[in-house]
Image (spheres, grey):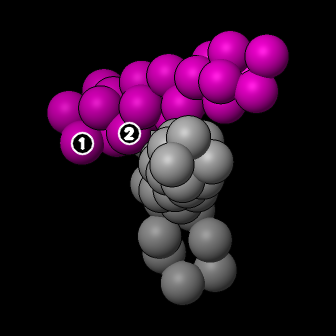
Amino acid sequence: MYFIGTAIAFLIAFYGTIMQVSEIIECPKTSTGIPMCFISLSIFTTLIITKAYLIKLKRF
């Protein structure tokens, strides 16, 4: 269930990032000018990798 939820959010963030880089759309930006879709992509990538790592540790 965890991976389904994070995968959906990851795909949305990935789509937003690709569209931002392609200059098709413009994501909302922080006060420092960083697009929030980049931040979302990094957060969900970190969540997925961390959870997969923790699952792997429990198997050994």
Decide whether residue 22 is among the magenta residues.
yes
As for residue 35 lying within the magenta part, the answer is no
* Residue at 24%, 42% in the rendered image: 21
Farthest residue, direction left = 22
Q: Position of residue 36 (x, y in %)?
A: 57, 56
Question: Which residue is tagged 1?
Answer: 21
Callouts 2 and 1 close, C-beta under 8 Å: yes
Find residue 52 and report its horizontal and vertical position in percent. Answer: 52, 41
| Kind of element beneath mark 2 | helix
**Outermost front residue:** 60
Q: Amino acid at mark 1?
A: Val
Q: Mark number for residue 17?
A: 2
Q: Is residue 12 above or below residue 13?
A: above
Magenta stretch: dominant SS? helix
For the magenta stretch, what is the residue range?
1-25
Residue 3 versus residue 11: which sits nearer the camera?
3
Q: Residue 49, labelled with which disc? A: none
Query: Which quadrant is home to the N terminus?
Result: top right
